[in-house]
Amino acid sequence: MGGSEHHSRNELSGTVHGPAVQAQTIHGGIHIRTEAPSGHQPPWQLPPSVRITDRTAVLSALERHRSHSAQGDHPTLAAVSGLGGVGKTAVALAWLNTLRPHFPGGQLYADLGAQSPGGPADPGEVVGRFLRALGVPTQQVPTAFAERTALYRSLTAERRLVVLLDDAASAAQVRALLPGGQSVTAVTSRWRMPGLTVDGGYAVHLEPLTPEAALELLEATLSDGRVAAQPDQARALVELCAGLPLAVRVAGARLAARPQRGITTMVRALTEEHHRLEALAIEGDHNVRAALDVSYQGLPPRAARLYRLLGLHPGSEFGSPAATAVLAEDATDTLDLLYDANLLTDVGDEHTGEERYRFHDLVRLHALAKAEDVESAQERAAALRRIADHYLATATRAEGIIDPHHLTMNRDYGAGPVVTTDFGDDVASALNWLERELPNLMAVIRSARPAGFATVGWQLADALWPLFLRRKFYEHWRTAHAEGAAAARELGDTEAECRMLTSGGIGELGMESPERALEMFEQAARAFRATGNELGYARTLNYQGLAHQRLGRLDRAAEFFADAASELSRCGDHRAGGLARFNLADIALTRDLPREAIAGAEAAYTTLTEAGDTYNAARAATLLGRAHLAVGLLDQAEDQLSLALTTLRATASGYETARALGTLAALAEQRGQADLARTHCREALDLYDAAGRSRSADAEAARTLLGQLEDRAGE
């Protein structure tokens, strides 16, 4: 497979590293924080409030419920239900945003996607986002759903924060996301949720606005005296909107854009739309759809086309580059028109200044229906491909910045134009973009095959490798590569399928599923052998060795590593051969054969250094230090470990830095330098915690040594 089956950094030993963080308490055997890390700001994720009318009684009832819960030392939970467009989210935000001064722990927000085109959000994924927002390093976010929720409740037990769970599909989806302690949670849904009463939930069902309240909202939207001047027409207009705030705001925005037009014109247009939509009415949605139709008809042609095509976007929110991609020209000013027309909601990041938008679910469905009515199948397919290409091209650019050694497979794009997001050449910015857009990237991967461009499915999964390796997201890792492998099989692309199998297998190792990983590596090996790809086959030998090593089959692992070292060198991939020698030396040290380990680690160090792989050369130096320490060559061990530590610190490789420090601690202890040994142990343990490896054998060894040193100090 040439250079295509190439993985970089430490994936060939199945380790993942991360930044340092101080640990303070223990949860389930894992050190965690119950306060935000130093310098971490509380999350303030709630969108801004919008004007509401006639909801004073509801807000008062919600606040009484909160006061009653606080008196009983219970968390507050309220479920707000009602028709689409009735203002459920607006009411929840009006209540929760007033609580900010009393809840310094922060605000968490999640769109649970009951009406999303991709289906309801996975609670485990949402909990993972909440944990990261609360300051848990990605490497410390547990993989198992039960452990995530337990950690989430532990972290929130002593914090005062508010949570908004928007557009919930069921009580079961909500229950895992409820925080502990004196927090306040609001849930919005089109459905009543009696199941939440067992959790102390207070149910509020919103009815449409009274005519007087709707008139007040229309007046506030127009602010030009037309409501007072044309009271009968204004009342007729809000009656046609059926008291739904979304419909009133959309109709008001349409009128506000035309200050010389009378309200009568809008009443006539809405009446005609009502007659057309009456047969399609579902729970009053036709009242909103009538207002949307009238507003849509008043858009300039360019804005109307952008509105239609954005309905095709597979994710729930998007930035201006995605809008530019779908329109095939700059969309900045056109987005402003849609926002001014109340057809888009601004969900931009106040800290970064990035512009991001979201449709109300009824508005998105309306836009999609217009696209299906107006745009040809070919035009819709071309627009969707431009969206997919935007995400693929930008993800590939991020991949090249973060991990250029991995970028070895071609990318295929449509007719274009291909729009990319500019985030400079900064690794952190590239990683942050991948993480922020991950829901959209996954939505594109899932939609690629049905949309007819299966290549995007596996190529986008491939481009996500640097994010998955560094920030884990294991469930996404598994899903993306499974879908990517299916896409490659559909295309008959064996090379791509093998890439998905081996990259996905590395993720399975990270999820402590070595048997599943081994099956994937063996499947790739069979495919490589069947196509005569000797290099690809040789690389799978190393992967299979890793899986056997994780399964405790050291003899079998050593056989695979030895074969890999020989075959990879013969095929010309000396760097991968050096990694196989490193893995073989690691097995030798585990078997208490330190001199054999020294010989193998020296050969690996030389090869990796010559290949320019400074990171893995440093890992080989750490292994040399451990082996020299095992035979009592303390000076040589210190030289190798100090060399490794310098490189590993520079690359922020937390886990491998911790291993070097742990060995230096053991060396210092042998020399009688107890203070230095304790310092090394403490730093190593902090790094193991940050890397999510506090249960590893190396971490346990450091913990045991530190305990022995402190016992001696207390004697």
Image: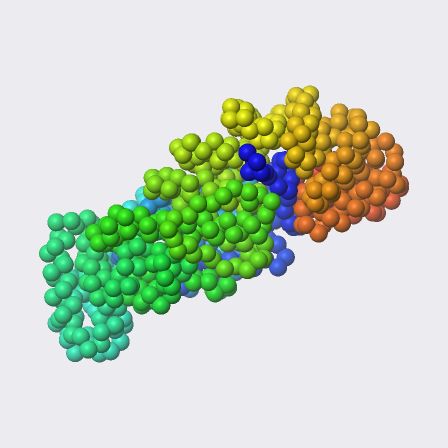
Give the residue displayed 66% in from the left and 21% down from the top. 556
Identify the coloring: rainbow
Does residue 83 sit above or below 545 in this rendering?
A: below
Q: How many discs mark residues in the rendered view?
A: 0
Residue 488: % across, % down: 44, 34
- For the question of whether residue 495 can be seen, the reply is yes
Does residue 1 sit above or below 94 in this rendering?
A: above
Does residue 81 sit above or below 122 in this rendering?
A: below
Residue 471: % across, % down: 56, 46
Query: Looking at the image, which is closer to me, 470 or 698?
Result: 470
Give the residue displayed 31% in from the left and 67% down from the top. 337
Give the residue displayed 33% in from the left and 46% down from the top. 117
Residue 324: % across, % down: 38, 60
Give the residue displayed 67% in from the left and 25% down from the top. 563
Query: Looking at the image, which is closer to me, 398 or 590?
Result: 398
Image quadrant of residue 222?
A: bottom left
- For the question of whether residue 709 can be seen, the reply is no
The quadrant the N terminus occupies is top right
Q: Is residue 523 left or right of residue 324?
A: right
The quadrant the C terminus occupies is top right
Query: Looking at the image, which is closer to me, 244 or 180?
Result: 244
Residue 441: % across, % down: 44, 47
Q: Is residue 413 left or right of residue 672?
A: left
Image quadrant of residue 171?
A: top left
Q: Is residue 695 left or right of residue 492?
A: right
Q: Is residue 622 left or right of residue 496?
A: right
